[in-house]
Amino acid sequence: MLFTARSAAVYGIDASIIDVEVDFSRFVSDKDTFSTVGLPDAAVRESRDRVRAAIRNSGFDLPSTKITINLAPADIRKEGSGFDLPMAVGILGAYGALELQDLKDFLLIGELGLDGTLRPVPGMLPVAVAARQRGIKNLVIPKANAREAAVVEGVSVYPVTTLLEVRDLLNQAGNGGIHVPAFHVEPTEVLNELQHFALDFADVRGQLTAKRALEVAAAGGHNILMIGPPGSGKTMLARRLPSILAPLTFDEALETTKIHSVAGVLDAEAGLVTQRPFRAPHHTISDAGLIGGGVIPRPGEVSLAHNGVLFLDELPEFPRNVLEVMRQPLEDRHVTIARASMSLTFPAAFMLAAAMNPCPCGYFNDKSRECHCTPPLIQRYVAKISGPLLDRIDIHIEVPAVQYKELRGAAATETSATIRGRVLAARERQRQRFAAVPANTSAKSVQEKIFSNAQMSTRQIRSFCELSPDAEKLLERAMLQQGLTARAHDRILKVARTIADLAAEPSITVPHIAEAIQYRTLDRSYWAS
């Protein structure tokens, strides 16, 4: 007898519907065979042992017979343990243990324990989206995945804990309708819950210049590099950056949650990512860990930081090949991973915040400590960061050691909420400016429309960054004296536009250009001083 159940497989941040076809032989034999076809990976092939044990330990007495399971379409590779539940349901349906014989309105996914309990699987949000797009009304999933799936409207989510509960649920559907209510959450309420940031800029003493640079970076979506001795507060400042960023919109939250769900790092209790991500990988990370990879590619740290902040502490300690693979996502705001069987694109629209010491010992140009590094040693240390990568970082700022009086001072400092108010006002000006700008239809990034100054193209820079004659002369002189590249020229104009937005001024004047140039003086001259 042939019985079909529906499930899904996740590729990238999207899911494809998979038909689980079960052929159950009615002829009892002394040989129990169970085969799975349709390009299953090792985890899917191993599921036959989990499924068989789960069915028998749930009280079903299946005779020894031949079972063949086909995962269609057969030309797409399947991986993961989420096919356990549809396989088990397909076997029960073929055996005649279900009242409902047509499961076209149900999508089932989940990992089975040997005792028949259901365990969560990653990627449930893309699965729910795919079910809605295909018109599948009901989603039967592990209870731990319920909040994540329920944020997708238009699909009834039924969380279950055991295979027997699934059997009872489907039997109810076959006998006139399901009596238990579907699980429901209000996604806008989840998103609009009070966001409390444990870290606040009010905790940071001194470092007014660095705080200002971070405010400019947050207002325009600019990448930032902080250079200073150990203990100057670079990491402390960076970890407070999310507290001054604009809140996530619902579309951004959904997009970010899909990535975290696929990667298996989503908080099951939350169900939805409500705050901008802050990712801080260790410098021992590989290029695949940073960008993503695998036989069926999974997102890396640059994608997990999508719509948030990627913080790289001790930047020169990262292997050079790891840093260089960031150049394309920094520019294009997406990353494409090609494999022999498929090519997948992940969004990677993140703010890069990086920190580094000025030399191996950390005390070059420090007035309180003597640096013992030789010039060749410093040059080798600095050369670990390539010029093209530095060009893609809009703001370079020096973070000196905090003086004792500043550290012990009782003067009140600005809170994150105060700074965030100015950032939001500047972002609103940018939103209005770019509202009429068409989306870049040639890009593969999920976030194609322009939302911040940092995303402006060369043509848009010329349209929105007109300079006064005096500002033009100042920029030309800086380009010649500091030997800045054409890309650095564009970065200066973008940052100057953001500074003008923070000041609520429509045009870019000399003070705005002067401050933007100040954020580029660390390119090379800093180490030559």
Image (spheres, grey):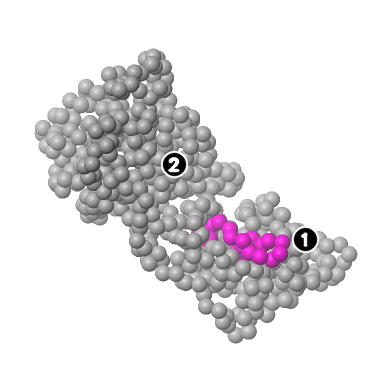
**What is the three-letter code of the residue carrying label 2?**
Ala
Q: Residues within 10 Å of mark 2 (few under 14, many from 20)?
A: some
Quadrant containing the C terminus is top left
- Left or right of 251 in this view: 501: left
Q: Nearer the viewer, mark 2 or mark 1?
A: 2
- The x, y position of residue 259, in whole percent, is 48, 53
Q: CA distance from mark 2 to mark 1?
A: 45 Å
Question: Relative to 394, does residue 483 appear above or below in the rendering?
Answer: above
Q: Residue at x 40, y 57 (%)?
A: 274
- The x, y position of residue 148, in whole percent, is 49, 62
Q: Residue at x 67, y 72 (%)?
A: 164
**Could one spot residue 463 in this view of the protein?**
no
Asked whether the residues under the numbered discs 2 and 1 touch, taking CB atoms below 8 Å apart as contact, a structural biologist would say no
- Left or right of 487 in this view: 57: right
Question: In front: 289, or 487?
Answer: 289
- Looking at the rendering, the stretch of residues picked out in magenta corresponds to 107-127
- Left or right of 80 in this view: 52: right
Quadrant containing the N terminus is bottom right
The residue that label 1 is drawn on is: 34
- The x, y position of residue 311, in whole percent, is 40, 40
Question: In front: 34, or 172?
Answer: 172
**What is the three-letter code of the residue carrying label 1?**
Phe
| Local SS, label 2 | loop
Q: Please say whether residue 464 is one of the residues in the magenta stretch.
A: no
